[in-house]
Image (cartoon, rainbow, N blue to C red):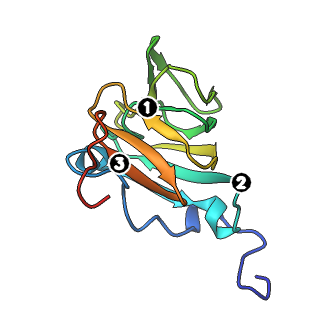
Amino acid sequence: MTENLKPVAIIAEEAPSRSKRSVYPEPFASRIIGREKKRLGDLFSLSNFGVNLTRLVPGALSALRHTHSLQDEFIYILEGTPILITDDGETQLHSGMCAGFKSGADNGHQLMNRSNEDVVYLEVGDRTASDVVTYPDDDLQATLINGNWQFSHKDGTPYPNT
């Protein structure tokens, strides 16, 4: 550890899990049960991009299927066999595979764990301000404002408590 109590290096699996399982408002947050994120980038005070070590138990989703207007995303599968669901269909992934999602591309994506084993992967995304996330399968959109996600219906009506 350094003087400001930030670690120099850690064992990723030993990092604390994010206390709040999802930032989605209900009824969407309950659909993400079984996902555990360890916010590795935050432990090192990274501000330009985030890095999460994410675990999906059998049956869990990574997120609602979504696209970002300004932020790029990247995933690298460490363990397990998730299904990548995009507008192009379903792709079986396995350990050692990776995928990237360019900002502004209208190809919604999510991972689903349909196996009987946990899935573990790294996700990396930038933190571009004013990003808008679109959820093609749900009446939901999100905007990053001052570092916090603000959720609304697609017509712009805010969800309560967001």
Q: Image check: 117 left or right of 26?
A: right
> Residue 137 location in percent, x, y?
30, 26
Residue 22 is situated, as x and y percent measured from the top left of the image, at 36, 54
Q: Is residue 26 left or right of residue 93?
A: left
Relative to residue 98, is residue 48 depicted above or below?
below
Indicate which label's residue lies in the foreground, 3 or 1. 3
Helix, strand or loop for disc 2? loop
> Separation of disc 1 and disc 2 at Cα?
21 Å
Check disc 2: other Cα within 10 Å, few if <14, some if 14-19, many if 20+.
few
* Residue 48: image tag: 2
Mark earlier in primary sequence (3, 2): 2
Where is 86 relative to 129, above or below? above
The residue indicated by pointer 1 is: 66
Image side of residue 34 versus residue 53, left or right: left
Instruction: Please indicate whether residue 63 sits to the left or right of residue 9 in the image.
Output: left
The residue lying at 37 percent from left, 55 percent from top is 23
Q: Nearer the viewer, residue 150 or 43?
A: 150
Q: Is residue 117 visible?
A: no
Q: Name the spot of residue 107 as percent of width and height, x first.
A: 50, 19
Residue occupying the far top of the picture: 88
Q: Quadrant of residue 77?
A: top right
Three-letter amino acid code at the position of disc 3: Phe
The residue pinned by badge 3 equals 151
Label 3–label 1 contact, CB within 8 A: no
Q: Secondary structure at mark 3?
A: strand
Q: To which quarter of the image does residue 135 belong? A: top left
Q: Are marks 3 and 2 in contact (CB under 8 Å)?
A: no
Q: Residue at x 27, y 61 (%)?
A: 161
Name the element at disc 1: loop
Q: Position of residue 60 (x, y in %)?
A: 33, 41
